[in-house]
Image (cartoon, rainbow, N blue to C red):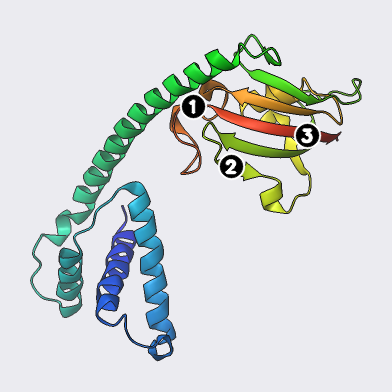
């Protein structure tokens, strides 16, 4: 981690610490610099919470004061870069271990769901394990290839029904999708559709986002569900 990044973390956290003493003040009494400091701190704190990183606010404040005063440091400043690189590597490994456990649990849940779902007479299963259900047939003639750009409307959900993405959330207009640049379940599934059709895809994790997931919205190892309407082919 670079010195600039560490300094930004410290300054932002110190701003949060100071803000605790003044949180009853009228917002108009804060200068633009104070507001910016607070919002920078808020943003970084949100990121640290997401990463599961717990900060000792007292030590952060102490480090800021020592650096600003030019006094003796509690810990050797020259060891900072090497220590932080090692520390962040350990944090990464810890996070990967946690994600691995979550992925195993979610894949187990996904397998149970897909096994049960396979018995639904409306659901078809491909050789890859992709499951799909025809909600509305299209023209039966025009189908895309893996090299095509398609126009689609869609809604993506987790198994518990949580919507993590949809064209409705983005204004409702059809979205252009390059089938060569999406998850495997989409590349395979959309090619089964003809123009004007609506399908529901049940996508196992190995055809979706795998053990890594996709940010906070899609957990590691998650089986996901997409309702897709193929509006057009470019």
Could you give the CA–CA distance between mark 1 and mark 3, rounded to whole angstroms? 24 Å
Mark with earlier residue (3, 2) = 2
Tag 2 or tag 1, which sits nearer the N-term? 2
Which residue is labeled 1 in the image? Answer: 210
In the rendering, which numbered label is found on residue 229? 3
- Element type at mark 3: strand
Q: Is residue 54 left or right of residue 234?
A: left
SS under mark 2 = strand
Q: Is residue 222 above or below residue 218?
A: above
Q: Is residue 6 left or right of residue 28?
A: left
**157 lies above or below 136:** below
Tell us which disc is closer to us: 1 or 3: 3
Q: Quadrant of residue 193?
A: top right
| Observer able to see residue 184 | no
Say if 187 sits above or below 153 in the image: above
Q: Is the residue under label 3 in contact with that under label 1 (CB below 8 Å)?
A: no
Q: Residue at position x 16%, y 58% from top?
A: 78
Observer-nearest residue: 87 or 121?
Answer: 121
Viewer-proximal residue among 2 and 125: 125
Q: Residue, x 58% and y 42% (percent of image)?
A: 163
In primary-sequence order, the first of circles 1 and 3 is 1
* Front in this rendered view, residue 205 or 66: 205
Q: Is residue 184 left or right of residue 142?
A: left
Residue plotted at (38% across, 23% down): 104
Give the residue displayed 27% in from the left and 75% down from the top.
20
Compared with 134, 62 (above or below) is below
Q: Which mark is residue 163?
A: 2
Q: Secondary structure at mark 1?
A: helix
Q: Distance of mark 1 from mark 2, alpha carbons?
A: 18 Å
Report the residue that reaches farthest toward the front.
120
Answer few, some or many: residues within 10 Å of disc 2's Cα (few below 14, many 20 plus, some between 14 and 19): some
């Amino acid at each position: 981690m670079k010195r600039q990044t560490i300094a930004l973390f410290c300054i932002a956290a110190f701003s949060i610490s100071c803000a605790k003493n003044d949180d009853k003040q009228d917002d108009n009494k804060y200068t633009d610099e104070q507001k910016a400091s607070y919002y920078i701190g808020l943003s970084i704190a949100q990121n640290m919470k997401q990463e599961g990183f717990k900060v000792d606010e007292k030590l952060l404040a102490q480090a800021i004061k020592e650096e600003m005063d030019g006094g003796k440091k509690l810990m050797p400043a020259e060891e900072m870069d090497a220590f932080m690189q090692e520390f962040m590597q350990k944090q990464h490994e810890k996070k990967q271990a946690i994600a691995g456990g979550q992925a195993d649990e979610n894949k187990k849940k996904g397998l149970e769901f897909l096994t049960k779902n396979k018995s639904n007479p409306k659901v078809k299963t491909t050789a890859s394990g992709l499951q799909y259900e025809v909600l509305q047939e299209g023209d039966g003639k025009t189908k895309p290839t893996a090299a095509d750009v398609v126009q689609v409307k869609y809604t993506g959900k987790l198994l518990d029904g949580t919507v993590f993405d949809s064209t409705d959330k983005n204004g409702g207009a059809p979205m252009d999708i390059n089938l060569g640049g999406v998850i495997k379940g989409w590349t395979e599934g959309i090619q089964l559709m003809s123009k004007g059709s609506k399908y529901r895809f049940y996508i196992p994790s190995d055809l979706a986002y795998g053990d890594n997931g996709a940010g906070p919205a899609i957990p590691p190892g998650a089986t996901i569900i997409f309702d897709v309407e193929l509006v057009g082919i470019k």
